[in-house]
Image (cartoon, rainbow, N blue to C red):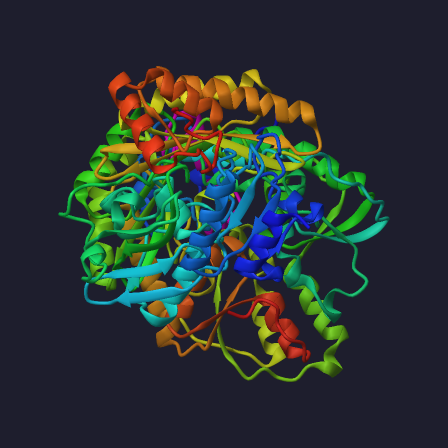
Amino acid sequence: MDPIYQALVDIVGQEHVSNQPEELFIYSYDLGTTEPHRPDYAVTPRSTEEIQEIVKLANREKVPVVPLGGGLSLAGLAVPFRGGIALDLKRMDSILEVNEKARYAVVECGVSQGQLTSYLERNYPHLTHSEPGAPPTATIAGNVAIHGQGDLAQPYGFNSDMVNGLEIVLPTGEVCKFGSCSIGSGWFTQHPLPDVGLFLGWSGTTGIITKVSIRLFPSKKIRGVGQFVVEDEELVPEIMYKLTHTQMTEDIVAFSQAVPPFASGLQHFTINIAADSEKELEFKQEIIWDDTLGEYIRSGAGGFLGFRSGLQRPQVSKTSDWRKGGGFEYVGSIMPVDTYPECYRRGREISERHDIPYTVLGRCVGTAHAMMFSWTYAFNRADPETVRQAREALHETDDLVLELGGTIWKPGLYGQKLVMERLDPNTLNLMKKIKQMLDPNGIMNPGNWEVS
Amino acid sequence: MYELKFNESECLSCATQDCLTRCQYMDIDRDTAKAEILKIARGEDSFVLHDCVTCYACEEYCPVNNHPFYLIVEKQEELDVPPLPRPLIRRGIQMGIPFRGEPVIDEINGQTLDMGAFADLMYLIQGKLFEGLPVISTDPRKMFHYFCQLMYLHYGRASVIKERLPGIIQTIAKHNVTEVICFHDECYGTYTSYCPAVGIEVPFKSIHFFEFLYNRLNELKGEITPVNLKVAYQRPCSSRLSSDKHHFVRDIFDLIGAEYVEREYVDENALCCGGTIQGQRREGSRKRTADVQKRNIEDIKNAGAEICVFNCPACYTTMGRLVAQNGIRPVFMSDLCRLAIGEKPAGWR
């Protein structure tokens, strides 16, 4: 009997650990272009205590641990490059608290976006959270861990800016809390205690998030989407600036794509607006469509496509999968808004060079403080040549992001290498020290952010 | 190239100038109407070209079938007076480009129902009314091969229609059809009104969907139970191109025991759903749309309608939710007919 397997069985029970190839296969890959690597074990713990025991075992035996939420990152962030334990956190799926007055929810790390959305709709219809464009099985914890953004990114910023507190299992097995919860108070604020934000953006290489407190926001009775379209990509930044100046939108996304043909060469905006009454809605619509965008309509440069009540969530992930064979991966980036035209043009060139229908999208983060810009490349899973083409296009795009003065969002290994090559040496050195201190045996998601 | 057959002398001798004097969106007296339509016919600019909401109604108002609306569209394009902003025109034109491969051509050898660009509404042609009827354009991925293109009248782009339509007709004809029942009356209007007006040949006979429904209901008369519902009808713009078939609305309602409520905005006075107005370049188009829709729905409500019947999927998309929010059930005509013969409508909201 494999002693590590037996030890894992002792921690979580036989039904929640596997070393069988057919089950390990599922954890060997994600839906992007990364080459698969099989773990040695797949484990589905149910508690922080079980995770502690697993990590202690792994640290003692120097076995890699790869934490996994929804497994939807696409960039290979949860592919077990060095084998070890695939730690599937989906059973940690309790919504522990919703504080209505302080507007936050405390959830375990396996709670999905869709789960929280439906829970709030049923029990707290006047509250909502910023749901990302990913499919609803993406987890809250996984999303904040990668600095995700959602459909409230315009007024409130990154989802990781909405974290009020974290519970973490360190690579050496200790449990730490951060934020007001760490002094025994409620989970209502991350500030103003000394900043020890060492766990977001590290792709699970410094610890395992087991609980998150996430801010909730008012959910107005009417939420809907309006669409606006322009031909000239140079207009996109100024329109984003003007729209954010109104402070009346919940989400602003600009996109362009080769397929279906109606969208090709045009820049579409989807603009989410919310209101508690028809009166408020009409007031906002008048400000947005008539006063702010009216000049483009009258000059013939922009067109209003209408407003529809009701949000389709998630919005973003439905726009990419256009190639026979059903695969796609994207490079996400955080860019200044005024780079949109160049991002669009250069991304289109890369796509056309690799014979892939282009798909690009920019989501406004904050009041045009930045945008998440993505370039998506479709491929046929059954055709290695198209996978290779997509991978090359992705790498070229990683290079492009840095060339255009942006940062790569949730980079895969290639992108991480590019970032580390450019990192300020002192910053890189600090990261090395942190990594060595927290994870002395290098067991956490090895391959990713290998600074040491 | 195909050319619109427009006879200027008919307008010169016209006693009513109904085409423009009856327009519900512009206030024009008879003298002005005559002057403006003649200016348009002679290729001169006119405020009508700028203010037209493209509701098609003047095609019906014209007492001599001289195609004033087709003329307006031709001149909007010729004089570069686009009714919509440029990106909307480009978007619309690109929307009609097929991109998912070629359609499968089955030989029909007779009558068929053509879903046109509404293959995703196949659920509306279920049940006894449609039993045994061959259908073409059933695949949403391929439906733009059957798209009649007439929508581009709203875009001031007659050239796109003329360029693409012969190919669409050829695709339909490849099925070896003799009679084509048009699911949408925009297709019917294309083949029976627009094509003759510009000289495009159509090698099959077109049948209006409501005429087909009426005849089928008569065949199934024994199975009809009166629906006993008060109904209003949202007449689409495209219906103005086949006004000789509009009586089938009332005929069907009579046959199935639906009470056609008395309204102000009915038949020739019908109001546009607003779908085409809201995106127009003219100042205030969004608010104008809201106003038209509000008047329309208030009229339906005041007439006591329980159901609002639609023919056009675009009208349904534009107005369906608003109608429902006002306590009136939106329903397609085919679904209402199915209800009358004891079947469960597929599209109840």
Apparent side of residue A57 relative to residue A430 in the rendered image (left or right): right
Task: Locate the N terminus of chain B by quadrant.
Answer: top right
Figure quadrant of residue A234: top left
Residues drawn in magenta:
B58-87
Figure quadrant of residue A321: top right
Residue A124 seen in the current view: yes
Residue B16 seen in the current view: no
Residue B175, given in percent of the width and then of the height, sits at 80, 43
Which residue sits at x=57%, y=53%?
Answer: A7
Task: Tell me: residue B261, above or below residue B287.
Answer: below
Q: Nearer the viewer, residue A400 or B163?
A: A400
Q: Is B136 covered by the magenta stretch?
A: no
Which residue sits at x=58%, y=30%?
Answer: A33
Which residue sits at x=43%, y=48%?
Answer: B55
Apparent side of residue A88 relative to residue A407 in the rendered image (left or right): right
Figure quadrant of residue A181: bottom left
Residue A276, given in percent of the width and then of the height, sits at 24, 63
Q: Nearer the viewer, residue B327 or A190?
A: A190
Residue A90, given in percent of the width and then of the height, sits at 50, 56
Q: How many marks?
A: 0
Q: Which of B108 and A41 is in front in this view?
A: A41
Q: Nearer the viewer, residue B35 or A260?
A: A260
The outermost residue toward the left is A192
Task: Tell me: residue A51, above or below residue A144.
Answer: below
Task: Tell me: residue B139, above or below residue A376.
Answer: below
Residue B233, given in percent of the width and then of the height, sits at 49, 67
Task: Tell me: residue B144, above or below residue B75.
Answer: below
